[in-house]
Amino acid sequence: MEIDKAIRECSDRRLQTKYKNATYVISRAFALYSLEEVAFSFNGGKDSTVLLHLLRAGYFLHNRETDLSGKQIDSREEIEVRTIYFESPSAFPEINLFTYETANKYNLQLEVIRSDFKSGLEDLLRKKPIKAIFIGTRIGDPNAIGQEQFSPSSFGWPAFMRVNPILDWSYRDVWAFILTCKVQYCSLYDKGYTSIGGIYDTVPNASLSFTDSDCGEHFKPAYLLSDGRLERAGRAKKCPSLPDSASIVGNGNIADKYWSRTLSASIIAVGDEILFGTFVEQMGAALCKRLHAIGWQVSHQSIVRNEVRVLLW
């Protein structure tokens, strides 16, 4: 199996440990659930791409271990897993193309859902005997709070087990796996995108921007981002004052002046001692430096009196 071979032969001990732990979680899931009872949530992004190939490797390793124990095994070499794709009207064309091409290449049993997540899952789980879903959630993702490698679905959602094999993987781990195993990934990542949402809220990561000899702006590939904390810095929002004449073009980019590429913050120091000159405020400069280091822009800094009416204002 080419994924397992590539990891075993690489010199990256950290990646080998992450791989071993992730495939163990996958193997445990296959010990608990049959292939018909599991599904894989795939969105064409880097995390779910990594998870796809971990599933392939984990399924292979699980069958090999089962064979050694003398039990009957599934004779299929590749995992033909039911795959859920929530197709959004705002998805990048490149994401859609990569998703469908990947599903065809690896013979994934693709279930395309075009409704919202909750109602789409409810409908699917009524029709299929799905008990567990493999998800590419990582710590740091907005929905990762409180999750573990095996986590029941949230209250109010249809009942299923969320299986998170790469929960403890970092941005660096994800790209180390992709590059070591030489697996294909969505072309947007070669254009400076480091975290991909929809065409209306995603731009290339400004940290990867560079200007060539013709003074044109270009972006390095996502795997060259040195600080994983800036992974989501390309998740931008349209400005409220966006004129009607502005239009979405090509792969969803829009003129830079209509997008906010960086997160911004204001710093407020509260203390009469500072204003009276009895204390020298030094934290402001340190905070500015720390915020800039992780991709934030400081737009305002103020010192105010320690009075309720001032603070409420």
Image (cartoon, rainbow, N blue to C red):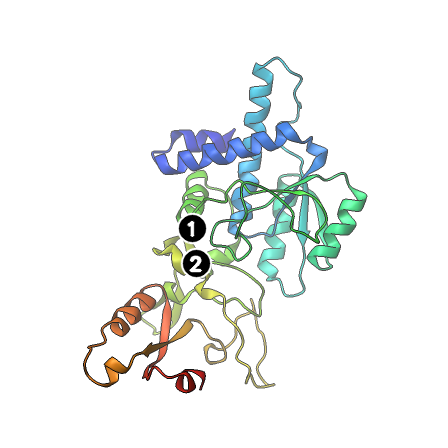
Lateral position of residue 224 relative to residue 109, left or right: left
Q: Amino acid at mark 2?
A: Glu
- Residue 129 in the image, given as x and y percentages of width and height: 76, 38
Disc 1 secondary structure class:
helix
- Residue 216 in the image, given as x and y percentages of width and height: 38, 72
- Quadrant for residue 16, please give it: top left
> Alpha carbon of mark 2 to alpha carbon of mark 1: how far?
7 Å
Q: Residue at x 37, y 64 (%)?
A: 207
Image vertical order of residue 101 relative to residue 106, above or below:
below
Image vertical order of residue 132 relative to residue 285, above or below:
above
Would you call the spot at circle 1 few (<14 residues within 10 Å), some (14-19), or many (20 or more)? many
Q: As rendered, which of 120 and 60 lies closer to the eye?
A: 120
Q: Residue at x 32, y 68 (%)?
A: 292
Would you call the spot at circle 2 few (<14 residues within 10 Å), some (14-19), or many (20 or more)? many
Disc 2 secondary structure class:
helix
Labelled pair 2, 1 in contact (Cβ < 8 Å)? yes
In this rendering, does residue 229 appear at all? Answer: yes
- Residue 126 in the image, given as x and y percentages of width and height: 80, 45
Q: As rendered, which of 8 and 235 lies closer to the eye?
A: 235
| The disc label shown at residue 231, or none | 2
Lateral position of residue 178 relative to residue 79, left or right: left
| The disc label shown at residue 106, or none | none
| The disc label shown at residue 171, or none | 1
